[in-house]
Amino acid sequence: VQLVESGGGLVQPGGSLRLSCAASGFTFSRYAMSWHRQAPGKERELVAGIASAGGSTNYADSVKGRFTISRDNAKNTVYLQMNSLKPEDTAVYYCKAFLSFHGTYWGQGTQVTVSS
């Protein structure tokens, strides 16, 4: 099982980034997917989640209206489009796959830094 995040980097406040998480080794289309982040000295927090079929999404209040989660089950990939980025969005971003009674998988994370 592998979850490989990409797309992180350094961006100025107000800018945009698109994170990708490529999955392999399990039946991606059956799993709910989510993005989480962890800033230095803080606990890991949920950013956004999407159901297995992609019809239902949820977001942390801090990112509503700025971030969009989506998935392409044909490509085994989940995305996080991040717009209007703020310095407080700086964190390591992780993707997670979850299916009841089957387990939870995490990626290794990708660094997002928002700074001028």
Image (spheres, rainbow, N blue to C red):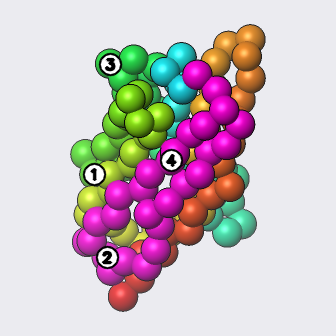
Disc 4 designates what residue?
Answer: 21
Rounded to the nearest angstrom, the CA distance separating label 2 from label 4 is 23 Å
Q: Residues within 10 Å of mark 4 (few under 14, many from 20)?
A: many
Amino acid type of the residue that numbered disc 1 sits on in the rendered structure: Arg
Amino acid type of the residue that numbered disc 4 sits on in the rendered structure: Cys
Q: Nearer the viewer, residue 98 or 14?
A: 98
Q: Are marks 2 and 4 in contact (CB under 8 Å)?
A: no
Disc 1 designates what residue?
Answer: 66
Q: Is residue 64 left or right of residue 39?
A: left
Disc 2 designates what residue?
Answer: 13
* Residue at the image point whose x is 74% and y is 23% from the top: 103
**Nearer the camera: disc 3 or disc 1:** 3
Rounded to the nearest angstrom, the CA distance separating label 3 from label 4 is 18 Å
User: Sequence-wise, which precedes: disc 3 or disc 1?
Assistant: 3
User: Sequence-wise, which precedes: disc 2 or disc 3?
Assistant: 2
Q: Quadrant of residue 59 in the image?
A: top left
